[in-house]
Image: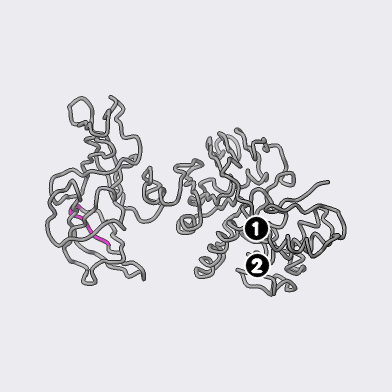
């Protein structure tokens, strides 16, 4: 007999009336998720997807590989056209890759149609049936799978409790707000208890306050069900606030994958630093290595003392020639006449900076970038200050404790501790 799994409980199909309704109702009430050890749920291996042919061909995905774990909230983040929605459609079975493999629970699923995969999708438009009530919308997928009336009623009730829509069970979609419609779509997708739930920018149509409320709801529901969620979004704040791990994509490739704090605090390339948050990205030359630091000579940026800065290495900073430092204590100068200067980029994180009205000694501890305030913007919890550095570039400093006396035209020195300066791929 086939069965659907939700949490620790099995709901048999086509069993008819239950012999003990009170027992089953209690089980549905306690349908708390089972939290299994983190294991590989989805494996995407060297997947390429090309649309069109010849000169007009578009490589939407270019040799993408990644792993999604069980019971995690995973986000595909990137600008429009980066390939994140194409990857989502491949996971759902709506598209077929031109190369590579996709495994679900260790089994190849590339040739499985959408209805043969334990995967459901919540679309941006929600796609609710306008003529059906909330409870009938939620029941639709269960009935298509052949569940009997009693099993459907119990599961629908459990889903409406999960998304907190019990009082609205008899309403139609046109009688609901946007946030309530989103919850109905979520309940309908969760009702068959898929192994994987795909979310295609489901919050983009909501206003800011409602969107933030739904972000918290999605996190709660993911924790309570234990189902793996994969979210597609271009909203950096949404990705950072909701996810266990984030994959940043651009031009059909995954540029960086990791926990939100690592993505934000330690971007590994210029694009990620520029796309996530408000990192100040400035050009320079790599002139020395002393793991975990790199010594960079900035371009078009005047320093308070000297002409070099120390930055944490955001990638393998060894030059093409030579092996670089052999130990954390061993440094290497690249100005040895044997190699040309190595282009480098460094990012200065705006929320780590402070201001000083005067000089700063000991630049091994902090780096002083003198400049002039050009704009001050109050953002509520923080204040953003734009500073034109000596040499021309404008950087931002954003903190909750900036001096209230800052005004445009004021001369300041931006101080960055070493862990606020990151060496990036050029």
Q: Report the quarter where the C terminus lies.
A: top left
Q: Residues within 10 Å of mark 2 (few under 14, many from 20)?
A: many
Q: Is residue 123 magenta?
A: no
Whole-angstrom CA distance, mark 1 to mark 2, is 24 Å
Residue 387 x %, y % = 24, 60
Q: Label 2 belongs to which residue?
A: 181
* Residue name at image x 68 percent, y 59 percent: 31
Percent from the top left, x then y, of residue 407? 21, 70
Point out the frontmost of discs 1 and 2.
1
Q: Is residue 276 left or right of residue 159?
A: left
Q: Nearer the viewer, residue 368 or 59?
A: 368
Q: Secondary structure at mark 2?
A: helix
What secondary structure is marked by label 1? Answer: loop
| Disc ID at residue 378 | none
Relative side of 252 to 134, left or right: left
Instruction: Look at the magenta stretch and give its main secondary structure.
Output: strand
Part of the protein shown in magenta: 386-391
Q: Which residue does the numbered mark 1 point to in the structure image?
A: 32
Label 1 packing within 10 angstroms: few (<14), some (14-19), many (20+): some
Give the left or right position of residue 78, taking residue 372 as reference.
right
């Amino acid at each position: 007999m086939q069965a659907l799994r939700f949490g620790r409980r099995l709901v048999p199909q086509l069993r008819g009336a239950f012999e003990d309704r009170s027992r089953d109702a209690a089980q549905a009430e306690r349908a708390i998720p089972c939290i299994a050890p983190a294991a590989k749920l989805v494996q995407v291996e060297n997947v390429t997807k090309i649309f069109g042919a010849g000169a007009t061909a578009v490589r939407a995905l270019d040799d993408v590989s990644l792993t999604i774990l069980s019971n995690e909230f995973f986000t595909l983040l990137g600008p429009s056209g980066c390939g994140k929605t194409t990857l989502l459609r491949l996971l759902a079975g709506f598209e077929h890759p031109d190369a590579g493999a996709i495994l679900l629970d260790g089994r190849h699923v590339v040739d499985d149609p959408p209805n043969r995969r334990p995967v459901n999708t919540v679309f941006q438009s929600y796609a609710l049936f306008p003529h059906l009530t909330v409870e009938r919308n939620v029941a639709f997928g269960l009935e298509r799978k052949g569940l009997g009336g009693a099993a459907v009623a119990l599961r629908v009730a459990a889903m409406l409790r999960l998304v907190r829509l019990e009082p609205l069970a008899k309403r139609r979609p046109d009688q609901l707000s946007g946030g309530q419609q989103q919850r109905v779509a979520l309940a309908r997708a969760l009702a068959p208890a898929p192994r994987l739930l795909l979310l295609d920018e489901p919050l983009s149509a909501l206003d800011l306050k409602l969107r933030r409320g739904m972000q918290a709801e999605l996190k709660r529901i993911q924790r309570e069900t234990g189902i793996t969620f994969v979210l597609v979004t271009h909203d950096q704040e949404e990705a950072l606030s909701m996810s266990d791990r984030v994959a940043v994509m651009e031009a059909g490739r995954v540029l960086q994958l990791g926990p939100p704090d690592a993505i934000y605090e330690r971007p590994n390339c210029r694009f990620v630093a520029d796309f996530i948050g408000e990192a100040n990205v400035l050009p320079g030359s790599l002139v020395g290595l002393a793991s975990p630091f790199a010594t960079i000579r900035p371009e078009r940026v005047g320093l308070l003392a000297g002409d070099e800065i120390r930055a944490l290495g955001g990638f393998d900073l060894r030059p093409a020639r030579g092996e670089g430092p052999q130990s954390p204590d061993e440094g290497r100068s690249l100005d040895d006449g044997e190699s040309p200067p190595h282009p480098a980029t460094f990012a200065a994180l705006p929320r780590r900076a402070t201001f000083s009205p005067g000089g700063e000694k000991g630049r091994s501890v902090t780096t002083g970038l003198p400049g002039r305030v050009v704009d001050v913007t109050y953002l509520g919890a923080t204040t953003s200050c734009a500073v034109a550095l000596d040499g021309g570039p404008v950087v931002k400093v954003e903190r909750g404790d900036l001096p209230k006396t800052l005004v445009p035209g004021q001369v300041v020195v931006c101080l960055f501790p070493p862990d606020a300066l990151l060496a990036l791929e050029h």
